[in-house]
Image (cartoon, grey):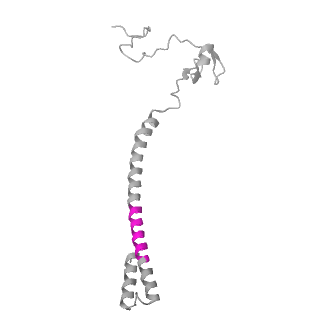
């Protein structure tokens, strides 16, 4: 039973007792109290309806935000790699074959000491080409372009 139904029941009991609400002080008091309870009951019902509607709106917003997060951050997670930093380069040690990550400052020095085998070796940058896997070459002017 809702609060409004309980207040309506209470109002019916008061009317069934034939309480004089015009001359009796107690009757006037009971009548005013029942009126206040009716208003409180209606206010509570309105608040419950608004709360339910707001909950549904929050759920819809949460679903929309979840879709946006998937669209924005899912692609970002797939594309990221700890090795995809432009400031670092992969170089294989010619002595032990270990793959090393070096930065531009090491490239400028021209000599690398492998942490695995402790051998020093010079970098030969002439072999590095961005088009070595392409059939027709990239047109960068390197010597690795395939001949037709």
Main SS of the magenta part reads helix
Q: Nearer the viewer, residue 65 or 88?
A: 65
Work out which quarter of the rendered image holds the N terminus and state it. Answer: bottom left
Give the number of callouts: 0
Does residue 75 lie above or below 90 as drawn?
below
Q: Is residue 53 visible?
A: yes
View extreme (left): residue: 148
Q: Quadrant of residue 118?
A: top right
Quadrant of the image containing the C terminus: top left
The residue depicted at 41 percent of the width and 54 percent of the height is 58
Residue positioned most to the front: 23
Residue 98 visible somewhere in the drawing: no
Closer to the camera in the image, 22 or 109 = 22
Q: Residue 34 location in percent, x, y?
A: 42, 80
Residue 18 drawn above or below residue 124: below
53 inside magenta stretch: no
> Residue at left 46%, top 84%?
29
* Residue 47 is covered by the magenta coloring: yes
Residue 100 falls in image quadrant = top right
Q: Residue at x 44, y 85 (%)?
A: 28
Q: Which quadrant holds residue 15?
A: bottom left
Task: Farthest residue to the right: give it.
Answer: 118
Front residue (pair 95, 62):
62
Can you say whether 54 is above or below 147 in the image? below
Q: Position of residue 18 (x, y in %)?
A: 37, 91
Instruction: Indicate the position of residue 6 as horizontal and vertical percent values.
Output: 40, 80
- Residue 72 against residue 44 in the figure, above or below: above
Part of the protein shown in magenta: 36-52
Residue 111 vs residue 32: left or right? right
Q: Is residue 122 left or right of residue 57?
A: right
């Amino acid at each position: 039973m809702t609060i409004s139904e309980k207040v309506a029941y209470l109002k019916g009991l008061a009317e069934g007792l034939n309480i004089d609400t015009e001359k009796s002080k107690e009757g006037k008091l009971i009548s005013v109290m029942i009126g206040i309870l009716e208003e409180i009951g209606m206010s509570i019902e309105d608040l419950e309806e608004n709360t339910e509607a707001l909950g549904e709106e929050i759920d819809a917003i949460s679903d929309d935000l979840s879709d946006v997060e998937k669209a924005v951050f899912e692609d970002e997670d797939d594309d990221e790699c700890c090795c995809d930093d432009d400031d670092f380069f992969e170089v294989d040690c010619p002595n032990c074959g270990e793959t090393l990550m070096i930065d531009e400052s090491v490239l400028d020095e021209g000599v690398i000491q492998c942490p695995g085998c402790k051998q020093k070796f010079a970098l030969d940058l002439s072999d590095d080409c961005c088009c070595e896997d392409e059939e027709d070459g990239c047109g960068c002017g390197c010597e690795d372009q395939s001949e037709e």
